Amino acid sequence: MSKKLYRSNENKVFAGIFGGLGEYFDIDPVLFRIIWVFVTIFSGIVPGLVVYIIAIFVMPARRAPVARDAGWHEETAQKDTADKQ
């Protein structure tokens, strides 16, 4: 299975760009954030912001697994218990 680059859902500060990069490259995302701050400051701020905004639209968000209705079994068990009484 090949690795895919996604925006992170768990490790994010704003949009999950650096969290996704950290998960993809298996590096702490704080390192990416620090590098981005320095590059953005020394490039005149606007290019760094433009690249980040483009990344928000280009990188897909990781879809969370579909959660099954966890309460379904409890509700059914409670109804069954109530019906038996």
Image (tube, rainbow, N blue to C red):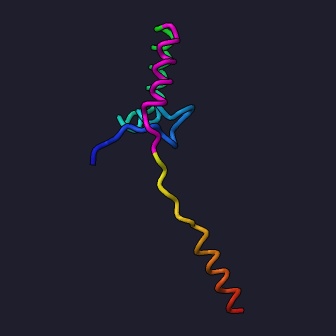
Residue at the image point whose x is 52% and y is 11% from the top? 45
The magenta span reads: 44-62
Residue 60, above or below 64: above
Compared with residue 3, is residue 80 higher up or lower down, i.e. above or below? below
As drawn, the residue found furthest toward the bottom would be 85
Determine the main secondary structure of the stretch shown in magenta: helix
In the drawing, does residue 14 fall left or right of residue 51? right
Where residue 66 sits in the image (x, y, percent)? 49, 57
- Residue at image x 48%, y 16%? 48
Q: State the quadrant of the C terminus.
A: bottom right
Q: Is residue 80 above or below residue 6?
A: below
**Closest to the observer, 12 or 75:** 75
Q: Is residue 6 left or right of residue 68?
A: left
The residue under the point 31% across, 42% down is 3
* Horizontal and vertical percent position of residue 8: 47, 39
Residue 17 percent location from the top left of the image: 47, 31
Return the residue nearer the eye: 34 or 40.
40
In the image, 31 versus 15, the foreground residue is 15
Check if residue 70 falls in the magenta segment. no
Residue 77: which quarter of the image? bottom right
